[in-house]
């Protein structure tokens, strides 16, 4: 995004310089043309920012969906797919209640992962993994992740596709945060003056 915004600014500066260098124009004509050029480039700049924001939001949404996807492979028809999702929702609700105290959740989720591995119940492991991600995202502090990263790593240890999905999601979130941070700093430093004289 920075490259596109910089290109817009360079193009605007080039056009303004060409207008100012034109000896055939009066100062009033130059001012009018410069104002019109600034308006056009301001619109292009705002459109580029909106397009980039939409792209980043879609990437975050798509990668989040791949992390929190509930696999219905093997289900025959929409009815069975819905049953799989219903089982997931029921497990999720029960897990949320059992881990309401996020400071004690590590033990509960660890036991769920143990049982999932012991019984070959992938849905139980998936719910524990998703809840660990949820707790980490909403409660992690600079001092502690409440033990959730250990659980996430444990779940992902033999699931390279899920690990890659989480990595992609993390990169998408970081990119969106960086763009938002840059835009905030840039806007704060320049305000709306970027297209003014």
Image (tube, grey):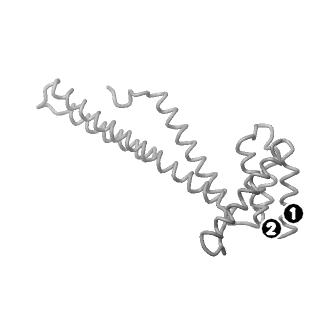
User: Where residue 183 is drawn, which disc sits there?
Assistant: none
Q: Give coordinates of residue 111: x percent, y percent.
A: 88, 57
Q: Give the residue drawn at x 19%, y 29%.
A: 30
**Vertical position of residue 40 compared to residue 124: above or below:** above
**Mark carried by residue 115:** 1
Between 120 and 98, which is closer to the camera in this rendering? 98
Q: Which residue lies furthest to the left in this view?
A: 24
Residue at point 65% right, 73% down? Answer: 75
Tag 1 and tag 2, C-beta contact below 8 Å = yes
Q: Residue at the far top: name it.
A: 28
Image mark for residue 121:
2
- Few, some or many residues within 10 Å of mark 1 (<14, 14–19, 20+): some
Q: In which quarter of the image is the C terminus?
A: top left
How many marks are shown on the rendered structure?
A: 2
Element at label 1: helix
> Is 17 located above or below residue 86 in the figure?
above
Q: Is residue 100 left or right of residue 89?
A: right
Q: Residue at x 69, y 63 (%)?
A: 162
Question: Is label 2 in a helix, a strand or a loop?
Answer: loop
For residue 131, side relative to residue 109 (left or right): left
CA gap, disc 1 and disc 2? 8 Å
In the image: residue 77, left or right of residue 135: left
Q: Is residue 79 left or right of residue 58?
A: right
Residue 48 in percent (x, y) is at 39, 44
Question: Where residue 61 sits in the image (x, y, percent)?
Answer: 56, 52
Occupied quadrant, residue 62? bottom right
Q: How crowded is mark 2: few (under 14 residues within 10 Å), some or many (20 or more)?
A: few
| Residue 37 versus residue 108 in the image, above or below | above
* Residue 42 in the image, given as x and y percentages of width and height: 33, 36
Q: Which of marks 1 and 2 is nearer the N terminus?
A: 1
């Amino acid at each position: 995004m920075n490259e596109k915004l910089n290109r817009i600014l360079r193009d605007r500066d080039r056009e303004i310089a060409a207008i100012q260098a034109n000896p055939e124009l009066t100062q009033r004509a130059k001012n009018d043309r410069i104002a019109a050029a600034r308006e056009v480039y301001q619109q292009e700049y705002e459109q580029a920012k909106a397009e980039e924001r939409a792209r980043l939001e879609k990437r975050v949404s798509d990668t989040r969906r791949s992390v929190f996807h509930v696999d219905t492979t093997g289900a025959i028809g929409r009815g069975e797919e819905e049953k799989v999702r219903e089982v997931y929702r029921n497990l999720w609700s029960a897990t949320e209640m059992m881990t309401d105290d996020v400071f004690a959740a590590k033990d509960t989720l660890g036991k769920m992962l143990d049982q999932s591995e012991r019984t070959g119940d992938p849905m139980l492991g998936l719910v524990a993994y998703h809840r660990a991600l949820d707790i980490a995202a909403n409660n992690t502090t600079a001092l502690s992740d409440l033990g959730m990263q250990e659980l996430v790593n444990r779940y992902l240890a033999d699931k390279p596709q899920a690990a890659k999905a989480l990595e992609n999601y993390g990169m998408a979130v970081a990119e969106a945060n960086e763009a938002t941070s840059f835009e905030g700093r840039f806007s704060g430093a320049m305000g709306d003056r970027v297209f003014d004289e």
